[in-house]
C-alpha cells in the first residue's frame, strides 16, 4: 500500500516546471557524484544528460522571468520539494559521512 503523501502546494505551471527541472538536475548530479559512484560509465551518461537538463532548467527560469514572475516563493517551493522527496534526492549530491571505525 502506498503511504498518503501530503498534498503538493498550489504552484503555477512555471513553478511546477522549475521544480521538476531542478530535481532532474539534482538526480543527475547525484548519479555523477564521485563519492557515491563505483564506475565511470554511469557518471559519464549522467554528465552527458546534464547538459540538456540544465538547459531546460534555465529555460524554465527564463519563462518565469519573462512572464514577470520575479520572485520565488521559497517556502512554498521548499514544501513542494519535500513532497517530491527532494531532501533524499539532494542528499545524494553531498559527500557521504565517514564510515564509523
Image (cartoon, helix red, strand yellow):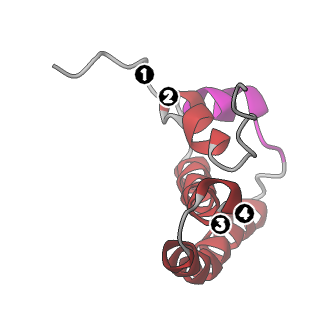
Q: Mark 1 sits on what residue?
A: 7
Residue 13 location in percent, x, y? Answer: 52, 51
Which residue is drawn at the image coordinates 50% and 34% (left, top)? 85
Which residue is drawn at the image coordinates 62% and 66% (left, top)? 32
Secondary element at image label 2? helix
Q: CA distance from mark 1 to mark 3?
A: 24 Å
Q: Mark 3 sits on what residue?
A: 57
Residues tagged 1 and 3 counted as in contact (Cβ below 8 A)? no
Stretch of the chain drawn in magenta: 71-81
Q: CA distance from mark 4 to mark 1?
A: 24 Å
For label 3, the crowd category at 10 Å Cα-Cα, with few meaning under 14, some 14 to 19 and many 20 or more, is many
Which residue is drawn at the image coordinates 57% and 52% (left, top)? 23
Tag of residue 83: 2
Q: CA distance from mark 4 to mark 2?
A: 21 Å
Residues tagged 2 and 1 counted as in contact (Cβ below 8 A)? yes
Secondary element at image label 1? loop
Camera-side mark, 2 or 1: 2
Dominant secondary structure of the residues highlighted in magenta in the image? helix
- Which of the two labelled residues, at mark 2 and mark 1, occupies the earlier sequence position? 1
Front one among 14 and 2: 2
Amino acid at each position: 500500500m502506498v503511504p498518503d503523501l501530503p498534498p503538493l502546494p498550489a504552484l503555477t505551471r512555471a513553478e511546477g516546471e522549475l521544480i521538476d527541472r531542478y530535481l532532474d538536475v539534482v538526480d543527475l548530479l547525484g548519479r555523477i557524484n564521485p563519492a557515491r559512484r563505483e564506475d565511470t560509465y554511469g557518471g559519464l551518461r549522467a554528465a552527458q544528460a546534464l547538459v540538456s537538463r540544465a538547459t531546460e532548467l534555465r529555460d524554465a527560469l527564463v519563462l518565469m522571468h519573462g512572464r514577470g514572475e520575479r520572485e520565488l516563493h521559497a517556502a512554498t517551493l521548499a514544501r513542494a520539494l519535500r513532497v517530491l522527496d527532494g531532501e533524499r534526492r539532494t542528499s545524494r549530491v553531498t559527500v557521504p559521512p565517514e564510515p564509523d571505525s
